[in-house]
Image (cartoon, helix red, strand yellow):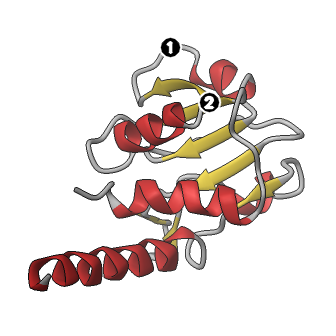
């Protein structure tokens, strides 16, 4: 089978930008079967130390600040520190109806080492991976 495309997109983005995960503390904010849990499992395979949090996690900002890498896949996460890598996979709409992620990009970007925007970030990578999975599955059926 294939990993969910968005979860795989997160790992591929980290690979593309040479962001090491082995031995790093990754906080995944979201426990869905589509992003949160699968990306946690993919990162565990690469020897990251993963903490899974969610919208009801007590003292979420404190936990997020302990991470080397934060993957936001729920709600509106806003607790970051210098030196972090932030992957925003949230899909929301702001008060004006504009597409936005979970992270307030403008305020977080100057603080962290790296961040993915929404829109224009992992969405196109996710789409590409979905197409790659589709082609691969089709090729397997004709062999």
113 or 48: nearer the viewer = 48
Q: Say which residue appears at 58% left-offset and 15% top-offset.
A: 59
Residue 38 at x, y = what percent? 36, 42
Q: In the image, is residue 26 above or below residue 34?
A: above
Residue 88 at x, y = what percent? 57, 56
Q: In the image, is residue 96 above or below residue 49?
A: below
Q: Residues within 10 Å of mark 2 (few under 14, many from 20)?
A: many
Q: Which mark is residue 1?
A: none
54 or 11: nearer the viewer = 11
Spot the residue most to the left.
141
Give the distance between the C-alpha atoms of the residues marked 1 and 2, in whole angstroms. Answer: 22 Å
Q: In the image, is residue 91 above or below residue 39?
A: below
Circle 2 residue: 48
The C terminus lies in which quarter of the figure? bottom left
Q: Say which residue appears at 67% left-offset and 56% top-offset.
A: 14
Indicate which disc, 1 or 2, sits on the residue closer to the N terminus.
2
Instruction: Tell me whether the residue at label 1 lies in contact with that at label 2, contact meaning CB atoms closer than 8 angstroms.
Output: no
User: In the rendered image, is residue 78 in sight?
Assistant: no
Spot the residue most to the front.
143
Residue 108 at x, y = what percent? 78, 52
Element under disc 1: loop
Circle 1 residue: 58
Q: Residues within 10 Å of mark 1 (few under 14, many from 20)?
A: few
Could you tell whether 80 is left or right of 15 in the image?
Answer: right
The N terminus lies in which quarter of the figure? bottom left
Asked which quadrant contains residue 128, the reply is bottom left
Q: Say which residue appears at 27% left-offset and 84% top-offset.
A: 135
Q: Say which residue appears at 60% left-offset and 72% top-offset.
A: 121
Q: In the image, is residue 23 above or below residue 41?
A: above
Total marks drawn?
2
Q: In front of the other: label 1 or label 2? A: 2
């Amino acid at each position: 089978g294939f990993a969910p495309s968005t979860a795989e997109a997160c790992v591929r983005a980290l690979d593309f930008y040479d962001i090491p995960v082995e031995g790093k503390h990754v906080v995944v904010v979201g426990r869905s079967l589509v992003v949160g849990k699968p990306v946690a499992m993919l990162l565990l395979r690469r020897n990251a130390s993963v903490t899974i949090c969610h919208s009801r996690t007590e003292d979420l900002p404190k936990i997020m600040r302990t991470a080397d890498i934060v993957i936001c896949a729920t709600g509106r996460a806003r607790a970051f520190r210098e030196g972090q890598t932030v992957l925003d996979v949230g899909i929301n709409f702001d008060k004006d109806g504009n597409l936005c992620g979970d992270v307030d990009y403008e305020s977080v970007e100057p603080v962290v080492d790296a961040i993915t925007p929404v829109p224009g970030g992992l969405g196109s990578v996710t789409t590409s991976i979905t197409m790659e999975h589709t082609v691969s599955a089709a090729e397997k059926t004709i062999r």
